[in-house]
């Protein structure tokens, strides 16, 4: 199998799994650049239909003959080595015809070549921060190209071929594919062990970020969250080799002098409101790369999406745009217009009237203990800001057997931030089920003060939630698997059964 991206002709591209969040994005950019695009996926979907409307030829199901959907064989085939098995018939056919097969990250690197590359990395917050950076730049009058792992709520898209020279993209570490990029500006939001099914050890996971930082151009910039210890260590190492570091974090944090010298953006205060979080930010940034002169200013803006983690993501977005030469004040105005990303504290609706009056239903992609804790903390803050006495009810679906076994105690601790919790069975995704391992490993470890329901039957979740819910509660579905389909079902069930009493 030829996987050398340096010899790739992008005139006719075939994407296996074209409907996925990442694949559909690069397909959209290819079509905007007038390439011939074909692809396949296991099911029809909104992204597939959108790409067809743009001119892509797409088949449902994977078959060798799909390579000729556009009338001739493609010049390159793109796949995800993690999601698509090597014995896929289209990949086998590509090998038989001598067609290069590359990863999505290889293709994205080719698409970004020649641009000011802004790459957003980190264990948590990549999609939200990338989306905020794009929205901030657009709000400042810039038209960047971008590729995001989720869809911007306002734009309704996950990728765009812009007219400017800035290209913003999410850099995924889960399979080390971020090492394919050569960032002009790199953002690292945080570093915490994850994807140990791939990396094996925490240090191997940390190493991929160290290797990524080594790829930053000599005249490039690292934007780093100094509230996170591992990211702060990375920032110090980059500064020592001469990379410009723009550190951000909370003003009240205690740091070493070596780390504190890198802090250029301090969140000095926040106020949680029903409409979001108001942020006060002190900013001092170099006037240019290598300059010893600084520009200092105070920014005051609103972050519509709840949670302090979103506040930090907004600061990273402002700094990334600033490093690209855009006015920070205009970037802050752009961030304030950020309406969120699908499956990141995504609002599905509320119940109006009856016994469940005021119940609001949200959905989130959180699938790591730190993410679950951050999202539930945000949910708690929102309920308190609304001051109507509601509870927080979490519906959580663990993702991967390996992650559940590794972090079940941390999941139990994070989920205990809810008033009540419904835990679904494990979504195995690419993993083979582990005999005897179920979500009970989490529920058995949860605090007794939390009302917990283990519910292996997904179809029963709406009724289970109804037995727990009362007026003005906040219901939050969480996980990286199929749980996302449950949020609208819960909302519909509550609206249709308003006569049932909550407990």
Image (tube, rainbow, N blue to C red):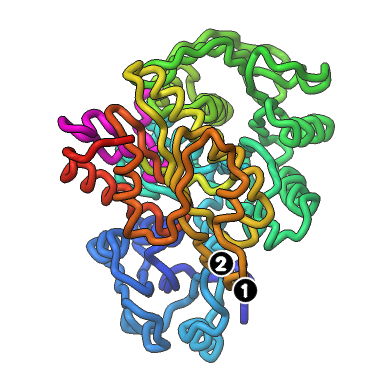
Q: Quick one: quadrant of the N terminus?
A: bottom right
- Does residue 20 lie above or below 328 as drawn? below
Q: Is residue 353 rendered to the left or right of residue 31?
A: left
Residue 129: give x, y in percent of width and height: 51, 36
Q: Which is the main secondary structure of the residues drawn in magenta?
A: loop
In terms of secondary structure, where does tag 2 sit? strand
Compared to residue 489, the image places residue 457 above or below, namely below
Determine the CA span between mark 1 and mark 2: 8 Å
Horizontal side of 45 relative to 327 (left or right) equals left
Task: State the residue position of label 1.
Answer: 3
Q: Tell me which residue sits at (36%, 80%) in the image.
A: 61
Q: Earlier in the sequence, mark 1 or mark 2?
A: 1
- The reply to whether callout 1 and callout 2 are in contact (CB within 8 Å) is yes
Q: Nearer the viewer, residue 110 or 150?
A: 150
From where the camera sits, is residue 338 visible? yes
Say if 356 sits above or below 400 in the image. Answer: above
Is residue 352 on the magenta stretch? Answer: yes
Tell me, yes or no, whether the highlighted magenta stretch contains residue 499. Answer: no
Q: Residue at x 61, y 64 (%)?
A: 437
Residue holding disc 2: 103
> Can residue 325 be seen from the camera position used here?
no
Q: Does 415 sit left or right of 461 as displayed?
A: right
Mark 1 residue crowding within 10 angstroms, few (<14) / some (14–19) / many (20+): some
Residue 503 location (% of width, % of height) = 33, 35
Q: Residue at x 60, y 11 (%)?
A: 295
Q: Position of residue 450 (x, y in %)?
A: 51, 36
In the figure, residue 448 lies in which quadrant? top right
Q: Label 1's element?
A: loop
Residue range of the region highlighted in magenta in the rendering: 336-361
Q: Nearer the viewer, residue 273 or 69?
A: 273
């Amino acid at each position: 199998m030829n996987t050398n991206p340096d010899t790739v002709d992008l005139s006719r591209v075939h994407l296996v799994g074209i409907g996925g969040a990442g694949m559909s994005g690069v397909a959209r950019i290819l079509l905007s650049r007038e390439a011939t695009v074909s692809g396949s996926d296991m099911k029809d979907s909104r992204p597939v239909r959108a790409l067809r409307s743009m001119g892509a030829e797409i088949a449902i199901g994977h078959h060798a003959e799909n390579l000729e959907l556009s009338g001739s064989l493609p010049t390159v085939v793109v796949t995800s080595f993690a999601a698509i098995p090597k014995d896929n018939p289209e990949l086998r056919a590509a090998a038989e015809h001598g067609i290069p097969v590359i990863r999505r990250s290889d293709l994205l690197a080719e698409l970004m070549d020649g641009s000011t590359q802004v790459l957003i990395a980190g264990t948590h917050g990549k999609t939200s921060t990338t989306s905020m950076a794009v929205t901030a730049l657009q709000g400042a009058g810039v038209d960047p190209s971008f590729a995001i792992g989720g869809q911007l709520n306002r734009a309704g898209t996950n990728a765009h071929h812009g007219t400017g020279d800035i290209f913003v993209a999410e850099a995924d570490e889960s399979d080390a594919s971020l090492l394919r990029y050569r960032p002009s500006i790199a953002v690292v939001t945080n570093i915490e062990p994850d994807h140990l099914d791939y990396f094996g050890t925490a240090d191997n996971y940390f190493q991929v970020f160290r290797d990524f930082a080594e790829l930053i151009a000599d005249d490039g910039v690292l934007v780093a969250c100094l509230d996170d210890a591992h990211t702060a260590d990375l920032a110090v190492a980059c500064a020592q080799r001469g990379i410009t570091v723009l550190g951000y974090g909370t003003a009240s944090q205690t740091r070493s002098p070596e780390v504190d010298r890198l802090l250029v953006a301090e969140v000095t205060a926040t106020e949680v409101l029903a409409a979001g979080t108001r942020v006060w930010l002190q900013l001092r940034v170099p006037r240019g790369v290598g300059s010893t002169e600084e520009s200092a200013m105070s920014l005051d803006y609103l972050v519509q999406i709840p949670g302090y983690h979103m506040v930090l993501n907004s600061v990273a977005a402002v700094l990334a745009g600033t490093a690209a030469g855009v006015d920070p004040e205009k970037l802050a105005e752009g961030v304030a217009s950020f309406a969120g990303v699908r499956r990141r504290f995504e609002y599905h609706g509320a119940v109006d009237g009856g016994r469940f009056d005021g119940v609001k239903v949200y959905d989130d992609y959180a699938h790591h203990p730190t993410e679950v804790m951050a999202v539930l903390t945000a949910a708690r803050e929102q309920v308190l800001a609304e001051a109507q006495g509601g509870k927080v009810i979490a519906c959580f679906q663990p993702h991967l057997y390996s992650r559940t076994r590794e972090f079940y105690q941390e999941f139990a601790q994070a989920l205990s931030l809810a008033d009540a919790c419904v835990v679904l069975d494990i979504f195995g995704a690419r993993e083979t089920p582990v005999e005897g391992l179920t979500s009970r490993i989490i529920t058995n470890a949860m605090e007794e003060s939390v009302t917990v329901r283990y519910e292996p039957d997904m179809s029963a979740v709406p009724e289970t939630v109804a037995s727990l819910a009362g007026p003005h509660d906040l219901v939050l579905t969480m996980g990286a698997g199929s749980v996302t389909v449950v949020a609208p079902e819960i909302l519909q069930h509550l609206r249709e059964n308003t006569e049932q009493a909550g407990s």
